[in-house]
Image (cartoon, grey):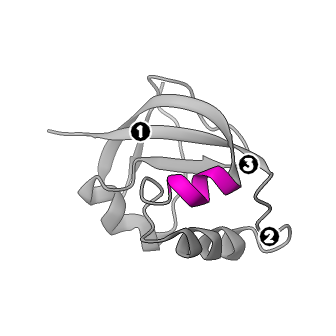
Amino acid sequence: MKIKIPFKSCFEDALLSGSKTWTSRTRKYGEVGDIFEAFGATFIIERVFRENLGFIASYHYREEGCDSRQEFINVWRKIHWRKGFDPRQEVWVHHFTKVEG
C-alpha cells in the first residue's frame, strides 16, 4: 500500500543518500511492505516496532539520520516542543530502505 510519511527538509540528504533508514513517530504510519515517497525517491518499510526514545537516542541516532545522540534529542525536542524528549516514551519505529531504480 502507498502511504504518506512527512519528513522535515533537514533530512532530505540523509534520506536520499540512504543513511537515514529509521523514522520514530508517536503514531504508527504504516506496515511492512508499505511504500512511501520523500523528496522524489521511493522507500519501502521493512520493519515496524515499538522502542523507547532513550534507546533510540543512545544506539540508533545514525539510523535516524543524526550524527550524535544529542542531535537526535535536539531534533525530537524541536519537532515535539510541547511534550519534549522523554527517554522512557515508547514510539513507533519505521525501518525502511530506499528503492533503487
Three-letter amino acid code of the residue under disc 1: Phe
Please state which amino acid type lies under the numbered disc 2: Gly
Quadrant hosting residue 66: bottom left
Image position of 90 (left or right of 65)? right
Quarter of the image with the C terminus is top left
Tag 2 and tag 1, C-beta contact below 8 Å = no
Q: Earlier in the sequence, mark 2 or mark 1?
A: 2
**Whole-number angstrom distance, CA of label 3 to CA of label 2:** 12 Å
**Residue at 59% from the left image edge and 41% from the top image edge:** 93
Helix, strand or loop at label 2? It is loop
Q: In the image, is residue 17 part of the stretch drawn in magenta?
A: no
User: Taken as a whole, is the magenta stretch helix, strand or loop?
Assistant: helix
Residue holding disc 1: 96
In the picture of the structure, the residue carrying the numbered disc 3 is: 26
Q: Secondary structure at mark 1?
A: strand
Residue 29: x and y, percent?
A: 62, 38
Q: Which mark is residue 69?
A: none
Q: Which residues are magenta?
A: 54-60
Residue at the spot of label 2: 84
